Image (tube, rainbow, N blue to C red):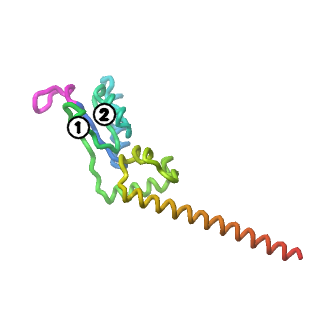
Amino acid sequence: MTDLDGSTMTEINLVHCSYHKCLTVYYGRVMQSVFNRCLPWSAGYLHYNSHLDDFYEGFRSRRVASVNNRALDLNRLGRFRISRFIRDPRDLVVSGYFYHRRGAEPWVDIEAPTAADWYFANGLVPEAVRAALGEAHDMRAQRARRARRTVENEFSLATQIEILRRL
């Protein structure tokens, strides 16, 4: 197979860059079916999730490779063709909201994310977001303390009423 410029396709790295909730799972299933099941191409397709170091280490050994949630250093790719699905941002927000509302991933339970937690999910967190997260964490902690006090007060009141009934 040759490309428009006459080079063979095996000389060109085929890369798919995906983003969360933008057909990542669907694309992976199709590529697995085509490159790893139907066609006799060894080392056909591999999705590296968000593991950028693993991607750079292994993408050349694959016919097609994909990586999620990362900006690639194009100079490290050699000759390449990249594909990406772009989704209507409104659909993306709605889909992401319902998906994450279910708590489908373990990171949704992280109370105070570290830089390492954010790196895996999105790369880099802007300072303004970091500050807002700190405030949100402080507010959650205050609400939790208030809820504990309310329970303690209700318990205390219930105990007092029971004692009065016994008298």
Q: Which residue is identified by label 2? A: 65
Give the percent coordinates (x, y) of residue 150.
66, 69
Magenta stretch? 1-12
Local crowd at mark 1 within 10 Å, few (<14), some, or many (≥20)?
Answer: few
Residue under the point 36% across and 32% down = 54
Q: Which residue is identified by label 1? A: 74
Task: From the viewer's side, name the closer residue of 55 and 98.
Answer: 55
Quarter the N terminus occupies:
top left
For residue 117, above or below residue 143: above
- Amino acid at the residue labelled 2: Ala
For residue 139, above or below residue 87: below
| SS at mark 1 in the image | helix
Residue under the point 36% across and 49% down = 124
Left or right relative to 105: residue 60: left
Left or right relative to 30: residue 1: left
The tag earlier along the polypeptide, 1 or 2, is 2
Residue under the point 89% across and 76% down = 167
The quarter of the displayed image where residue 48 is located: top left
Task: From the viewer's side, name the closer residue of 88 and 158.
Answer: 158
- Amino acid at the residue labelled 1: Leu
Residue 32 visible in image = no
Give yes or no for residue 32 being in the magenta stretch. no
